[in-house]
Image (tube, grey):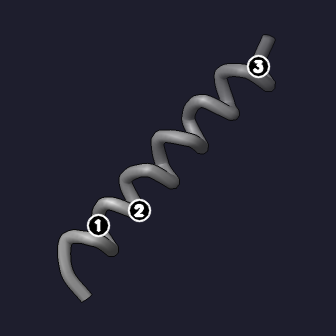
Amino acid sequence: MGPNVFRAAQFEAFSDGVLAVYTRR
């Protein structure tokens, strides 16, 4: 495993945050 795994986790967290923002309002 390398930077790709970290990149995927980062993207997942980012999309999760975006989803939370959209579902909050």
SS class of the residue under badge 1?
A: helix
With respect to residue 9, does 19 lie above or below?
above
Q: Which residue is mark 1?
A: 6
Q: Which residue is mark 2?
A: 9
- Circles 2 and 3, Cβ within 8 Å, touching? The answer is no
Q: Which residue is mark 3?
A: 24
With respect to residue 15, does 6 lie above or below?
below
Amino acid type of disc 2? Ala
Specify whether 22 is left or right of 5: right
SS class of the residue under badge 2?
A: helix
- Circles 2 and 1, Cβ within 8 Å, touching? The answer is yes
Q: Residues within 10 Å of mark 2 (few under 14, many from 20)?
A: few
Point 76% across, 19% down: residue = 24
Identify the image quadrant of residue 19.
Answer: top right
x, y percent for residue 8? 40, 63
Q: Residue furthest left?
A: 2
Amino acid type of disc 3? Arg
Point 80% across, 11% down: residue = 25
Q: CA distance from mark 1 to mark 3?
A: 27 Å
x, y percent for residue 15? 56, 41
With respect to residue 17, does 23 lie above or below?
above
Point 73% across, 21% down: residue = 22
Q: CA distance from mark 2 to mark 3?
A: 22 Å
Q: Nearer the viewer, mark 1 or mark 3?
A: 1
Q: Residues within 10 Å of mark 1 (few under 14, many from 20)?
A: few
Identify the image quadrant of residue 1.
Answer: bottom left
| Residue 23's disc number | none
